[in-house]
Image (cartoon, grey):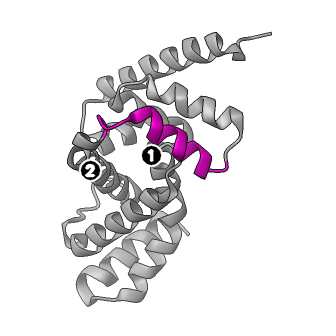
Amino acid sequence: MSSTDDIRWVAQVALLGDKGAFDKLTCKYQSSIRRFFLNLTMGDAPLSDDLAQETFIKAYLNISSFKGISGFSTWLYRIAYNVFYDSARAHKHYEDIDEQMIDSQRHALNEFSAEKMDIYKALKVLRKEEQTAVMLFYMEDKTHKEVAKIMDCPLGTAKTYILKGKEKLSVYLTNAGYGNN
């Protein structure tokens, strides 16, 4: 399935209201969008599923605003990025409750390896923008240009977020015992 398929399916949805075409787009991108949210939420599967669902609902409702200037996946990740940050802002006041207790419960509920948990801990040392840029670039294989479009920032800023994030992760993981041996 190519980007040409994406454009055809978008047109079918926008012009004809073809829900089957949107289902094809959903099937093509749901795993990567959900993985993106799993990484941003540090493994919270129920929250990731909710955010992914909200992303696809918003994409469906706003499909006519897709201009084709960038790829459909870039447009969809931009919606996902906004959904995540809207959710984070809405739930910001809950973070002060007892972050350590919540983290320990979340880690107990999620079946992750110790190494993956160390990566999640390392990601927490990054600023949100660095975290998102690093995940888009390294985990979602987006280009610098796509990261900049998704995050709605200049290309140089996206590159800086990725570079600074990579440097901070390197320091954290080296201090955690993952250094070059």
Dot placed on the residue nearer the N-terminal end, 2 or 1: 1
Residue shown at the point (49%, 64%) measured from the top left: 29
Residue 151 x/y as whole percent: 29, 40
Against 41, is 129 above or below? above
Amino acid marked by disc 1:
Thr
Amino acid marked by disc 2:
Asn
Q: Residue under circle 2?
A: 82
Against 68, is 180 above or below? above
Q: Is residue 109 magenta?
A: yes
Residue stretch in magenta: 95-111
Q: Is residue 57 left or right of residue 121?
A: left
- Tag 2: Cα neighbours inside 10 Å, few (<14), some, or many (≥20)? some
Quarter of image, res 112: top right
Residue 115 versus residue 95: which sits nearer the camera? 95
Residues at circles 2 and 1 in contact by the CB criterion of under 8 Å:
no
Residue 97 x/y as whole percent: 31, 38
Residue shown at the point (26%, 47%) measured from the top left: 91
Q: Quadrant of the N terminus?
A: bottom right
Q: Residue under circle 1?
A: 41
Residue 163 x/y as whole percent: 45, 19
The mark closer to the camera, 2 or 1, is 1
Residue shown at the point (61%, 50%) measured from the top left: 110
Q: Quadrant of the C terminus?
A: top right
Quick check: can you spot residue 170?
Answer: yes
